[in-house]
């Protein structure tokens, strides 16, 4: 019973962290259903931002999210942006609730997807202290379907030392469901 409760808490914490990505729409240019041009044609940079710092506020005027990156490039022809070492922070009740970082990210306007690449770390917070973590190499967030997925090795850890690993995951944020695909293993500490 204790193990199942901890697994549920870990899954809920992951879904809260996923909500950070969901509400982040800094680069939302609206969904585009047109065909993506040949990558060889994508030679022009539409805009380039150094030391980008974006903030989003809720309807009450409270800070809800920040997104920072030392370098953002948008390519008009390929309908995508690239971000170097992005950090997205989500806030609830004026407290940090979750963060997501990676070495780079691609925001694809045509598929409405954000792809976090290399050393992806998603952290959820409880009472301002880091509570649980998701580590992987590639994490896709589809803004249209409000879901995340990865075909890579994923590792969930928490501050109690519990570890769950798998190869591949799919989470539907609206339905609050998490599916671990293959090779699921776990180590849980009973107290």
Image: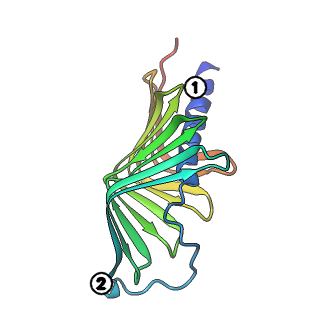
Q: Nearer the viewer, residue 129 or 35?
A: 129
User: Residue pushed farthest front?
Assistant: 61
- Image position of 153 (left or right of 149): left
Mark 1, other Cα within 10 Å: few <14 / some 14–19 / many ≥20: some
**Residue drawn at (50%, 39%) of the image:** 98
Q: Locate the N terminus and report the quarter of the image it occupies.
A: top right
Residue 153 point in image, percent of width and height: 39, 47
Residue 115 point in image, percent of width and height: 43, 61
Looking at the image, tell me whether mark 2 or mark 1 is earlier in sequence order: 1
Residue 111 point in image, percent of width and height: 52, 72
Q: Which mark is residue 6?
A: 1
**Residue drawn at (57%, 53%) of the image:** 22
In the image, which is nearer the foreground, mark 2 or mark 1? 2
56 is higher (above) or lower (below) than 36: above
Q: Which mark is residue 87?
A: none
Check if mark 2's residue and mark 1's residue have beta carbons within 8 Å. Answer: no
Query: For mark 2, what is the residue?
Result: 43
Residue 140 point in image, percent of width and height: 47, 58
**Residue drawn at (48%, 32%) of the image:** 132
The kind of secondary structure element at disc 2 is: loop
Mark 2, other Cα within 10 Å: few <14 / some 14–19 / many ≥20: few
**Residue drawn at (53%, 67%) of the image:** 28
């Amino acid at each position: 019973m204790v193990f199942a409760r901890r697994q549920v808490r870990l899954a809920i914490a992951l879904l809260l962290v996923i909500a950070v990505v969901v509400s982040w729409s800094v680069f939302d240019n609206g969904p585009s259903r047109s065909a993506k041009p040949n990558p060889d044609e994508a030679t022009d940079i539409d805009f380039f931002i150094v030391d980008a710092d974006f903030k989003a506020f809720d309807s009450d005027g409270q800070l809800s999210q920040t997104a920072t990156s030392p370098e953002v490039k948008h390519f008009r022809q390929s309908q995508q942006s690239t971000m170097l070492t992005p950090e997205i922070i989500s806030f609830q009740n004026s407290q940090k609730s979750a963060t997501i970082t990676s070495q780079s990210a691609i925001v694809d306007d045509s598929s409405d997807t954000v792809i976090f690449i290399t050393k992806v770390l998603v952290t959820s917070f409880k009472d301002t202290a880091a509570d649980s973590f998701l580590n992987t190499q590639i994490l896709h967030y589809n803004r249209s379907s409000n879901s995340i997925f990865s075909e890579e090795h994923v590792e969930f850890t928490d501050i109690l030392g519990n570890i769950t690993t798998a190869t591949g995951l799919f989470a539907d944020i609206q339905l609050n469901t998490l599916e671990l695909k293959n090779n699921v293993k776990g180590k849980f500490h009973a107290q």
